[in-house]
Image: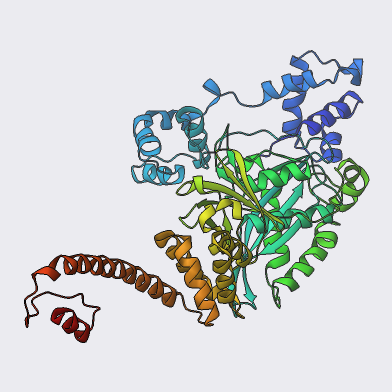
Amino acid sequence: MTFREVHVFEIREVLRLWLRGEGLRSIERLFSVDRKTIRRYLEAAGACGVVRDEGEAQITDELIGQICEQVRPHRPDGHGSAWEVIKANHDQLKTWLVEDKLTVKKAHELLERRGVVVPERTLHRYALEVLGVSRANRRTTVRVADGEPGAELQVDFGRMGLLPDPATGRQRVCWALIFTACYSRHCYVQLGFRQTTEVVISGFEAAWGFFGGVFKVVIPDNMSSIVVKADNLEPSFNQAFVEYAQDRGFLIDPARVRKPTDKPRVERVVPFVRNSFFAGEQFIDIDDGQRRVETWCRIRAGMRTHGTTQCRPAELFSLEEQAHLLPAPVFPYDIPIYVSAKVHRDHHIEVAKALYSIPGNLIGQKVEVRADRQLVRVFHRGQLVKVHPRQKPGGRVTDAADLPAEKTAYALRDIEHLKHLARGHGDSIGAYAEALLDNPLPWTRMRQVYALFGLVKKWGPGRVESACARALDAEALSVPLIARMIERATRTTPSRNRSRCSQGQHARSDRRAQPLCEEGQARVRLPAMASSASSTVACQS
């Protein structure tokens, strides 16, 4: 025998027809309810104090509840016999469902093997109410309010599929950065192959242009391009994205890790984009896909009737939400890069394959660098220590103040400064240095000038000045020649002094030895400068 549950409106109609004077057969014919069922409900109504002559005013919700309570069968503790059978196997079910983590369906099969046959639905209710587990082991949730118009925007990445990449000539995984307005459910999609901070910021810029304004609060997923370290209470954000949010005027409120319920509006849009837009389509490249997805956002997704709001998202957004947005950006955002660089021994750091000078007292230290399209700012321990104009890869910027004073001219190839230093040692030295540097590539002669300065340091400016003067007269431009000239002059000067001293000594000895000379003999040693003839004459006198 089959039983059909009689609904509340059917009980109300049976009572209404009976109070109007209809009999059991008439009620059965008019409402298609069995006479025995009608009789049971009418008897229960009489037991509850319903009088036929007092009219329909007696029919209340409380009365119908009392009638249902009397007609429907009563079970001890609200459960039937199958519940008692299941309770007898409580320990075994606890082992299977709680300790072994089996499903309720598997436990139902194991009970049947033991000869215990109970309805599966009753076993599910027992597992949920007594053991605390259910078929899906789901917890109850609550629906979060949508908030004020223009207040919140939820953002998430969704994997779409493969798209051809003209740059590499192969298929690559395409990701969709999806933006969903919480109030109107209007959405925007930005396609790309990467999930870097630059890509995300570019997607936000395109979204502000699509919506015509900036939302006050952004609720992103814990993507690494925005959240560096996820935490339920104190997450750490990417510095570049924080500066971008400050520039555009919105706040960041990221969802918790593995908590899709924190951003349910955009979570439901991810499969919708994948199935409604991407699946089954053929795209030429990423640009073709982007043009088509923007049209899809405006027409297919924007003009559909949303199941929850029962409104078209694009129309609801235009009517109630767009006016509450912050003003849309006028100028494009200059996306900076942030690096931590070490100051090398050459007083420079490398940023994006370009070199920038840093004060010498920071050699070996780590500095924080922020580089945008125009400037490169260098910080050390929170203090701004240097600002340079941004250079292309391979470029170099050197500030003379960052280098040692004695190496500045050489490092910067400052020819005029080098000439000035040479003139400071003497006019001839300065003229000789200018002659050395008079070349189409003067910096190739700088080492010779520095070698000339080395001679000045070794021998003094006087000797080098005279040597340079003689070399200029002879039109001989060679620093090694200047060095040889000074060395020869230095060796010649002491020998001449010694010759003069020896001549004086021989003259004196000659005057003393003259009285001792004997006739016919020349025993006196004459000076080396005297001739043999004169010596003979002196001895024969």
Residue 388 lies, in percent from the top left, at: 66, 54
Residue 135 lies, in percent from the top left, at: 51, 42
Q: Quadrant of residue 526?
A: bottom left
516 lies left or right of 488: left
Q: Is residue 142 above or below residue 57?
A: below
Q: Is residue 110 above or below residue 371?
A: above
50 lies left or right of 535: right
Q: Is residue 488 visible?
A: yes
Residue at 87%, 43% in the rendered image: 321
425 lies left or right of 39: left
Nearer-the-camera pick, 201 or 6: 201
Residue at 55%, 38% in the rendered image: 381
Q: Quadrant of residue 228?
A: top right
Residue extending furthest toward the top: 49
Residue at 48%, 58% in the rendered image: 346
Q: In this figure, which colouring scheme has been used for the structure? A: rainbow
Which quadrant does the N terminus fall into? top right
Nearer-the-camera pick, 111 or 447: 447
Q: Is residue 70 above or below residue 127?
A: above
Q: Is residue 2 visible?
A: no
Residue 62 lies, in percent from the top left, at: 78, 18
Residue extending furthest toward the bottom: 533
Residue 125 lies, in percent from the top left, at: 52, 34
Which quadrant does the C terminus fall into? bottom left
Q: How many marks?
A: 0
